[in-house]
Amino acid sequence: MTIRRIRWAPIWLGLIVVFLYAPLVRVGLNSFNANEIGTSFDGFTLDWYRAAWNDVTVRDSLRVSLVLAAIASVVSTTIALGVVIGLRRQPRLRGLSRMLTAGRLLLPEVVIAAGIAIMLPLFGIPLGLLALVIGHVVFLTAFAIVLIEARAAGQDPRLVDAAADLGASPGRILRTVVIPDLSPGIWAAALLTFLFSFDDVVLSRLLSNPDTPTLPVTVLSLINRRISPEIDAIGTVVLGVGLVVFIAAALIGRAGLATALTGGRERR
Amino acid sequence: MSESAVVEVRNARRAFGATVAVDDVSLEVGHGEIFGLLGPSGCGKTTLLRLIAGLEQPDAGRILLNGADVTDLPAHRRTVHTVFQSYALFPRMSVEGNVAYGLRAAKVPVAEVRERVTEALRLVGLAGKERRHPHQLSGGEQQRVALARALINRPPVLLLDEPLAALDAHLRREMQTELRRIQREAECTFILVTHDQDEAFSLCDRVAVMFHGRIAQLSPPDEMTRRPATVEVAAFVGRSSVVPAVWSGGRGLVAGTWPVAAESATPLADGAPCALVLRPRQLRLNGSGGIAGRVAHVAFSGDRYEATVQTPAGPIRVETDDPPAGAGTSVFVDADGSPAWAVSAANVPSD
């Protein structure tokens, strides 16, 4: 009985992994498949990548997505850092901030997106990059705050006391003690908000300029028209970008933590 | 004294909600002194230290450094530096970065920084460890880095919050000697907070004992054990036994039967209730005479014995050279003739 259970466990795990990742593998393989319908693998080709690259809409929307993700990531991480630092001085506002943050994370994205889409014309802001940046920043700041706060919560308040005691001005304390200590959280926030912005569909769908949508929106409309290995090629590229950013975030998080806590101890 | 006081605290008060951590405290610390703030945890000694450092603002009262009122100056504008409990070293900076922090904040030229870091590390016996990080150091070494970091700006006063609490007993004794040497070499005034009376008494020139945010007694250590100001002080410091008595003609009458010759700071009226502070060393065990009791237990402390005798007046500790009678034996406790210390008390603890 027991033995049978132990034998089943890896099989279940295997099935789950297959279920989760088989579609990704299929997308990856199919992007190199010479057979357009993808029913069988008829030889290796880069035609679909070429086709995607030569598609002006795809190229334009890739550019929009990258620019958007970069701006949204920098802006929301900066705002979040400001919020976290501000909360250290005004701990009474922490409850309010938590509520606002949680609100943005818990509300369905489509509701927030619709709200923003309705609000923007009132301020005379047309659909397009600016609207996208505003929408993404509203949403992503909440993620960034959570990530940086998590790091700030572990910060030893006596380090700030020690720096002040040694004659460091508040600005110097921020530069030399507080921000360096938060940096793993800051980097993680910057990279993850980039990633979230880059593959966001809901907000982007409602806030994009219809002529130059973001990449995920373009892909969505391509799928509506025809299912082609071109989409698999785009998907594979996006997946690749995502993986690189994600691994970078994980490595930076680890490296930062390592210097502060464990790495040095292991070295000793 | 006011002229030469390096630190002066005048009627300082600091409350956290309903808890008054520091309650109308005044004190002066002279140049080159090692001054101890002693008391049980929660007595307000660390808050008082933080008031002097500027890390805490007083609700009332003034703080003076070298005669200048610094009450309204924030911590980073005060020339007082602190060695924090468990050190608070900057984990992401090397030893050099930690020690040089105060100099860099003061915008000292690079060449001088290097020179003074080397000198400070030499002073604390850590020469050559500049490149290490705090987590690569032992507890004792971290302590030395904290000292070097706090001393590098040559503060007139160094505040030390439980500086030895995180060290093991052996290292603690070693660091006590080290602290004295460093204090002399750096020509600095030390104010140190501790809950450990042995530490306070062996290191400090003067000690203030605090209870509930107030200073109960401020005196040199030997006076504190020999002539405690209140029953609370007597019970907290030293190993003396405190027993209730009634004052009668220059003597305290314990349990109505045992007269003990005693001195007191203020004259006591005949018939006044008081507490007698009996040092273990001034008592002896007899076959008869004194107060009757039963040996509760015997402890051996290095080279002498200490018997705790249960008497009608409460437990009394007696020190003897020879092994005393075992637990359960009936004995008499008597004074050796040297005067005990009497503290006037309306409410003497009943135990």
Image (cartoon, grey):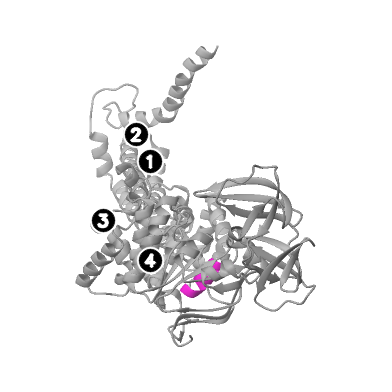
In what element is the residue under mark 2? loop
Task: Give the labeled residue for mark 4.
Answer: B180
Disc 2: host chain: A
Mark 4–mark 1 Cα distance, whole angstroms, equals 79 Å
**Residue A86 x %, y %:** 48, 66
| Residue B230 in view here | yes
Describe the element under mark 3 as helix, strand or loop.
loop
In this rendering, which labeled residue sits more in front, label 4 or label 1? 4
**Same chain assignment for discs 4 and 3:** yes
The lab-note entry on whether marks 3 and 1 share a chain reads no
Chain to which mark 4 belongs: B
Residue type of the residue flagged with mark 4: Arg
Q: What amino acid type should be assigned to the residue bearing mark 2?
A: Ser
- Whole-number angstrom distance, CA of label 4 to CA of label 2: 81 Å
Residue extent of the magenta highlight = B44-53
Q: Identify the mark nearer the N-term, 4 or 3.
A: 3
**Residue B174, image x and y in percent?**
38, 56
Q: CA distance from mark 2 to mark 3?
A: 64 Å
Q: Which of labels 3 and 1 is toward the front?
A: 3
- Residue B100, position in %: x, y? 29, 66
From the image, tell me which residue sits under label 1: A222
Q: Amino acid at mark 1?
A: Leu
Q: Quadrant of residue B158?
A: bottom left
Label 1 in the same subunit as label 2? yes
Badge 4: few (under 14), some or many (20 or more) residues near its Cα, within 10 Å?
some
